[in-house]
Amino acid sequence: MIGGFGDAEVFSFHATKFLNCLEGGAVVTNDGALAQKIRLMRNFGFAAHNRVDSIGLNGKLNEISAAMGLTNLESIADFISINLRNYKQYESELADLEGVKLLAYSDNERSNYQYIVLEIDEGETGVNRDQLIEMLRMENVLARHHFYPACHQAEPYRSLYPHAHLFLPRTERVAARVMVLPTGQAITQKDVCVICDILRTALRNADIIRKRLGKMPEARCQDRLAETFRSRRKLG
């Protein structure tokens, strides 16, 4: 189970997380001395009233955030059920798209199914991950580059270790191919159908998308491409 690796583990309760408190987080540890040190740090270093024993910060979870977290905790089973429903629908509707691989979750493990992760093989689809994301955004679908850029591709690591890419070929490959589709409580089954239909249409017209996104000025390209794309969707 999570929570027991290393000296300590950190959990984020940011609004984008499965269990969120709007902001904040938690540190868990089996080390009593470390736990006491962290408790002091989160409250300005105060060990008692008017007694400061260490350097600290204001890391306490406020009441509103705590209430949000408790409310989400009460509904966690419903959130998992909705995410699983969306995942299974994506799995079914994307199964016949060559070059589009949906990240599989193991049946032997529990999951919250928070992410709908696709790996795009440009050699089979005819368009790359970035072009598909751009196409989806033209249709008001907020698909995302996720787990991107890879840590070694961003500062300060890019400058500190300029040759890191030579040792991380799999990381480079995944960072260039992975995208995430919308899911969660705000996404309905109809929304999933529309998103998958857009992807199917995009792959059927890969040659047009590739050519227009590569040759036209961005604003004009988006207008022309979106118009062509919508007309082809209507024609099926």
Image (cartoon, grey):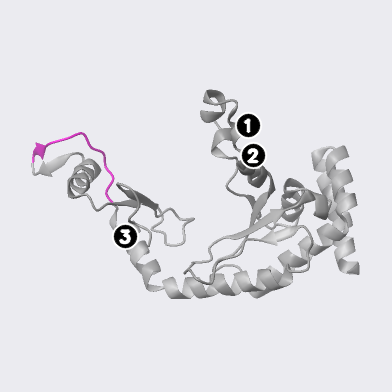
Q: Which of 150 and 79 is in front in this view?
A: 150
Marks 2 and 1 in Cβ contact (< 8 Å)? yes
Q: Name the residue under label 1.
A: 166
User: Are dots 1 and 3 in contact, CB under 8 Å?
Assistant: no
Of badges 2 and 3, the one in the foreground is 2
Q: Is residue 191 shown to the viewer in this render? A: no
Residue 128, can we see it? yes
Kindly identify which numbered label has been placed on residue 66: 3
Q: How crowded is mark 3: few (under 14 residues within 10 Å), some or many (20 or more)?
A: some
Between circles 1 and 3, the one closer to the viewer is 1
Query: Which residue does the numbered mark 2 point to in the structure image?
Result: 169
In the image, what residue type sits under mark 1?
A: Leu
Question: Secondary structure under badge 1?
Answer: helix
Instruction: Look at the magenta stretch and give its main secondary structure.
Output: loop
Q: Give the range drawn in magenta.
A: 50-60
Residue 32, horizontal then vertical, whole percent: 18, 50
Total residue callouts = 3
The vertical placement of 84 against 126, above or below, is below
